[in-house]
Image (spheres, rainbow, N blue to C red):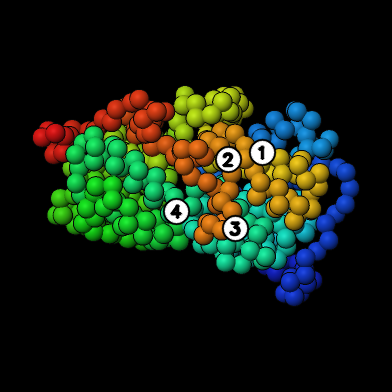
Amino acid sequence: MRHRWMTRAGVGAALGLALAFGAAPARAAGKGPIKIGVIAEESAIVGQSISQGAQLAAADINAHGGVNGRKLQIIVYDDHSSAADAVRAFQRAAEQDHVKAVVTTFISEVALAIEPWAARLHMPTITPAAASDLISKQVHDNYARFKYMFEGWLAAPDLARAVCDSSHDLFVKELHMKSAVIMSEDADWTKPLDAGYKSCLPKAGLKVLDEIRFNPDTTDFTPIFNKIEALHPDVIETGIAHVGVQPTVQWHDQQVPIVLGGISAQATNPTFWKDTNGAANGVVTQTGTVAGLAITPRTLPVAAEFVKKYGRFPAFTGFTAYDAVQALAGAMRRAHSTKPDAIVAQMEKTNMVGTLGRYGFYGRKSPYTHALRYGTDWVPSVFMQWQNGKQVCIWPAKLCPNKMEFPAFVKSVHMAAK
């Protein structure tokens, strides 16, 4: 069931008055399907993969008996990447469609707009991609209020750790690099990411020469690349999600002789090669997985199901949304209930084999309460490189035996003397 709408201004005046006083409305009773709302931008592959991954998980769960004998029903809402539209969709999901949980958004600003409503409506909610550490910090700082919110992807400080861990192995040990410039879009999720970079890159062996933050609406990256080139770093460590095509194309067309690494969320999409007309060749980025990589026994079967049903390999959010629905279903199954507090209590105990690693959440003592756990025993984080039209896994070594390859304009500067 899909809602391509956005309601008239002032959705539910009576509801608004009730919510102003913090009232949590009664849930519809019954033994019909258990409804889960999915809110994402349907026009973007990364958003579309969220709803598709969620629906795939529900179909798999239903094929194996559902949740305590009840089927799952996914209701999809298109938020058009708008926080206001997402909040209205969240209200409708809770008040009109009577969902029992929500999977929502890859955008931190949207997740942060929804989080107070998850608290007010006592709605178990999980974001499969938003990475701002403020999402989990609010849970930690005010657990009683915000405990209904979970992060189903790595928080920005852990993403920074992953970039530093991989950079030490790939850039310092293998290529003998010594310096980096940080280049990130100005967004909620990149503030803790850049802070993490500045702390851990020197420990990994890369001196940070500069930190450049740019408006996500930037279209001309020439001045930025000129400034970076003047500093002569070995690698550019990025933090970009809202942009990606434009800086990559200009990096290639201007023959910027510096490795482009870090995190480029759009580069994780299987269409990125086509989107950049091949300019992505040589780009390194953190991701969830790549085609053919078996992180766990569940990775390849779910990927195959996705390709069979939707005709393409998913963005990484297809996997994280799949795992999010599986985690919610598991919590409901163990709780023998769809009551919010019962779901939350069991979500906190989640310890399952997911598609991208062992899936579980940090506890109340962690500053990242309810964020996804990072590490070799949990979600290991994967780094890929675009090579001749393909996404190739290059790190960690135990999963990825492939070597890095770079275009000639990068090799000529950094690789010849190695």
As helix, strand or loop, the secondary structure at mark 3 comes to loop
Indicate which disc, 4 or 1, sits on the residue closer to the N terminus: 4
- The residue under the point 77% across, 59% down is 95
At label 1, counting other C-alpha atoms closer than 10 Å, the crowd grade (few under 14, some 14-19, many 20 or more) is: some
- Asked which quadrant contains residue 410, the reply is top left
Q: Amino acid at mark 3?
A: Arg
Instruction: Say which quadrant the N terminus sits in.
Output: top right
Q: Give the image location of residue 173, x and y in percent.
A: 24, 37
Picture disc at residue 217: none
Mark 2 and mark 3 residues within 8 Å of each other at the beta carbon: no
Is 346 situated left or right of 195 in this image?
right
Q: Is residue 358 above or below residue 302?
A: below
Instruction: Say which quadrant the C terminus sits in.
Output: top left
Which residue matches tag 2?
Answer: 359
Q: Give the image location of residue 136, x and y in percent.
A: 55, 58
Which residue matches tag 3?
Answer: 364
Is 28 situated left or right of 103 in this image?
right
Q: Is residue 295 above or below residue 46?
A: above
Q: Amino acid at mark 1?
A: Gln
Q: Amino acid at mark 2?
A: Tyr
Which residue lies most toward the left here?
Answer: 417
Q: Please tell me whether mark 2 or mark 4 is closer to you in this view.
A: 2
**How far is mark 2 from mark 3, CA to CA?**
17 Å
Which residue matches tag 1?
Answer: 326
Q: Please tell me whether mark 1 or mark 3 is closer to you in this view.
A: 3
**How far is mark 1 from mark 3, CA to CA?**
22 Å
As helix, strand or loop, the secondary structure at mark 4 comes to helix
Q: Please tell me whether mark 2 or mark 3 is closer to you in this view.
A: 3
- The residue under the point 75% across, 55% down is 340
Q: Is residue 64 above or below residue 198?
A: above
Which residue matches tag 4?
Answer: 156
- Asked which quadrant contains residue 27, the reply is bottom right
